[in-house]
C-alpha cells in the first residue's frame, strides 16, 4: 500500500453557521518534512485549516487525516495527547509578562508535567534553537516583537513536535523581524519539522521559496510548488465548477470582517446606540 500523506484534507467543508462557510470543499495533502504556506486574504479560510489541524474544530463534511489518524474519530480525551505532537505558534506571542524568557518556556514545561531538573536541562537547548538564549533573563517587555515571537516559538517546541502550525506568525511584526521569524521556521523545517504557516504576507511567501496554497473564499484557488510552478487545485467542488456557487460570493477580500455582531434595525429605535 502506498504511504499515506502526513496531513490529508479530503473534500473538507466547514460551516460556522447557516450563513458562513469557513471552507467550501478543500482537498490538500502535505508530506512529512514539507513547509507549506496557506496564503490569502482575510476570510479566505486559512485559520480554519489551522484550527482543523489542531483539533479545535471538526469538519462539517469531509475528513482530515493527520499521521494516519482520521480526526473525526478523535475523542475529547485524546485531544491533549494529539496536541502534544503539534506545536502552535500564536500571532500575539501570548507571553507571561511577569516571567523571564526562560521562565516562560519553563512554565509551559512544568504545566505538562516536566520536572524542575528537566526544565533546567532542556530550556537552554530550546532557546538556542530559536537563537534567543542570550536573552534568557530578560522580561518580555524588554524584548523586540521579533524576539518575543522567538520565545513563543520556543514554547511551541517544548515537546519537540513533528508538526508546527503558525497562524500569521509575522502579523504583528515589521518586515525585518518578519524575515527573522520566517528564517527560524525555515531552519526548524531544515531540521525535519513539518511546518504549516498561514499568512496574508505575499512578500514573505515569495522570499521563502516554499510551496504555497493560495486560498480564496473557502476554496483553494491554485497551488504554487517550491519550484514556482503553478497548479490547479486537485479538487474543485462540482457546484463551483458549474458556477452554482460563485467562487467569491461575498467578495470577501473587500468585505468587513464578519466577527462584528449584526445589529438589525428596529422600528421603535428612537435614540442613536451610543448617545
Ligand atoms: N468562529 C467563527 N464564527 C463564524 N464565522 C467564522 C468564525 N471563524 C471564521 N469565520 C468565517 O469563516 C471564514 C473563514 O475565516 P478564517 O478561516 O478565519 O479566514 P482567514 O484566517 O483566512 O482570515 C470567514 O468568512 C470568517 O468570517
Ligand atoms: Mg486567520
Image (cartoon, rainbow, N blue to C red):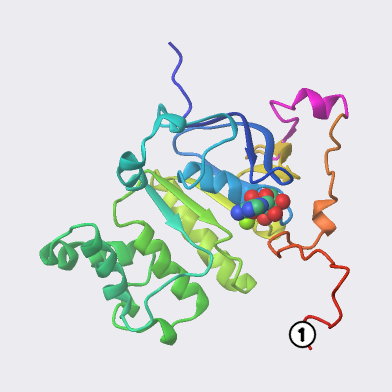
Predominant SS of the magenta segment: loop
Residue 76: image location, x then y, percent: 36, 41
Q: Position of residue 202 (x, y in %)?
A: 71, 56
Q: Which residue is mark 1?
A: 274
197 displayed left or right of 141 = right
Q: Quadrant of residue 115?
A: bottom left
Image position of 240 with respect to 94: above or below:
above
Most distant residue in the front direction: 268
- Quadrant location, the N terminus: top left
Which percent across, then down, holds residue 108?
29, 64
Q: Secondary structure at mark 1?
A: loop
Q: Quadrant of residue 157?
A: bottom left
**Is residue 260 toward the left or the right of residue 243 in the image?**
left
Q: Is residue 234 magenta?
A: yes
Foreground: 161 or 191? 161
Closer-to-camera residue (51/87): 51
Amino acid at each position: 500500500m502506498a504511504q499515506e500523506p502526513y496531513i490529508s484534507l479530503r473534500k473538507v467543508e466547514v460551516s460556522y453557521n447557516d450563513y458562513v462557510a469557513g471552507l467550501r470543499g478543500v482537498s490538500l495533502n502535505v508530506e512529512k518534512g514539507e513547509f507549506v504556506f496557506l496564503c490569502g486574504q482575510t476570510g479566505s479560510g486559512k485559520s480554519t485549516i489551522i484550527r482543523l489541524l489542531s483539533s479545535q474544530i471538526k469538519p462539517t463534511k469531509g475528513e482530515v487525516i493527520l499521521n494516519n489518524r482520521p480526526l473525526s474519530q478523535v475523542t475529547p480525551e485524546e485531544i491533549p495527547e494529539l496536541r502534544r505532537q503539534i506545536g502552535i505558534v500564536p500571532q500575539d506571542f501570548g507571553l507571561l509578562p511577569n516571567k523571564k524568557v526562560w521562565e516562560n518556556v519553563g512554565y509551559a514545561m512544568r504545566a505538562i508535567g516536566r520536572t524542575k531538573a528537566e526544565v533546567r536541562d532542556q530550556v537552554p537547548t530550546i532557546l538556542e534553537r530559536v537563537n534567543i538564549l542570550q536573552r534568557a533573563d530578560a522580561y518580555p517587555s524588554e524584548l523586540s516583537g521579533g524576539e518575543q515571537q522567538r520565545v513563543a516559538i520556543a514554547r511551541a517546541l517544548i515537546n519537540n513536535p513533528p508538526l508546527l502550525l503558525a497562524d500569521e506568525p509575522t502579523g504583528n511584526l515589521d518586515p525585518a523581524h518578519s524575515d527573522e521569524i520566517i528564517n527560524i521556521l525555515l531552519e526548524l523545517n531544515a531540521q525535519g519539522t513539518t511546518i504549516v504557516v498561514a499568512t496574508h504576507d505575499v512578500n514573505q511567501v515569495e522570499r521563502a521559496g516554499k510551496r504555497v496554497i493560495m486560498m480564496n473564499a473557502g476554496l483553494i484557488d491554485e497551488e504554487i510548488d517550491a519550484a514556482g510552478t503553478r497548479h490547479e487545485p486537485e479538487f474543485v467542488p462540482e457546484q463551483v465548477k458549474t458556477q452554482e456557487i460563485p467562487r467569491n460570493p461575498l467578495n470577501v477580500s473587500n468585505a468587513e470582517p464578519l466577527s462584528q455582531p449584526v445589529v438589525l434595525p428596529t422600528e421603535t429605535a428612537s435614540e442613536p446606540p451610543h448617545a
